[in-house]
Image (cartoon, helix red, strand yellow):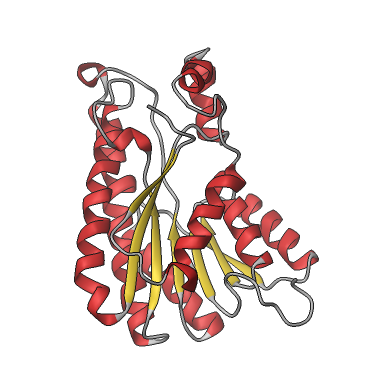
Amino acid sequence: MINGKNMGLLAGKIAFITGAGRGIGAAAARLFAREGATVLLAARTEGPLKAVVEEIRAMGGVADHVLCDLADPPGVRAAVHRAVELYGRLDIAFNNGATAVPPAPMDQMPEADFDLMYTVNLKGQWIAMSAEVAAIRATAGTGAIVNTSTVGSWGPNATLPAYGAMKRALNSLTESAAATYGPEGIRVNGIAPGTTLTEMVRAWEAASPGIVEKLNARTALRRAAEPEEIAEAAAWLLSDRSSYVTGAVLRVDGGMS
């Protein structure tokens, strides 16, 4: 429940979520609030953020938003600190924000696209994690972080080579952070979604008609996930019910081969 005492999965937690204006991030914001968390939503575009915040408040949750471009390190740090300014501490963070570029073989990818993948999908995540660890350490003391990777981070990724490469590097950062901050009681995990019906995947389908059907054929459950299904995995990893889990990158892929 939200009105009255909440005994949900994330009851009493202060949560920071990037990429929260749509897709998995927006689904996570709604879910975390239903499960009792106070949520600060971050993304580049204010309109969608405001809409999700209004939804959460309408159901009795506590939420606010902050603009955050993962390509802007000072802005990322300021967005994380905003949670502390608003709510006094930070307990959990879901680093879901990312960007995509048109699918292309490696030799046909513009250099600018590769640079963008690095700046947002790897460096931006490192900046966010570092700021979140500092905020958790200085306020709550202990907490949890979850990073969104992809099943495309394992093995070859001929269609989205730079995207896969940066997410594989993010897996490594996730594991390293878990080893580094575990002694302090800060857990760091990742989720690796399979095909999920987000705006990013719909854009990929528009650029490569039939790609979702092909991916579903390689998936044991023979369907794509809804964003809410991916958010459920993140919520569990951020909750105290996963208290002995750190350094994991959990496949949430419907059994994709």
In the picture as drawn, the residue positioned furthest to the top comes out as 209
State the residue at coordinates (55%, 81%): 86
Q: Which quarter shows the C terminus?
A: top left
Q: Is residue 150 left or right of residue 164?
A: right
Q: With 213 as the anchor, is 107 left or right in this view? A: left
Compared to residue 90, the image places residue 166 above or below, namely above
Residue 60: % across, % down: 77, 71
Residue at x 39%, y 65% (from the top left corner): 145
Work out whether residue 30 or residue 68 is closer to the camera in this orientation and state it. 30
Q: Residue 221, position in %: x, y?
A: 54, 29
| Image height of 208 relative to 225, above or below | above
Q: Position of residue 116 (x, y in %)?
A: 31, 39
Left/right placement of residue 80 relative to residue 152 reads right
In the figure, residue 126 lies in which quadrant?
Answer: bottom left
Q: Is residue 59 above or below residue 184?
A: above
Which is more toward the observer, 148 or 63?
148
Q: Quadrant of the N terminus?
A: bottom right
Q: Residue at x 36, y 85 (%)?
A: 141
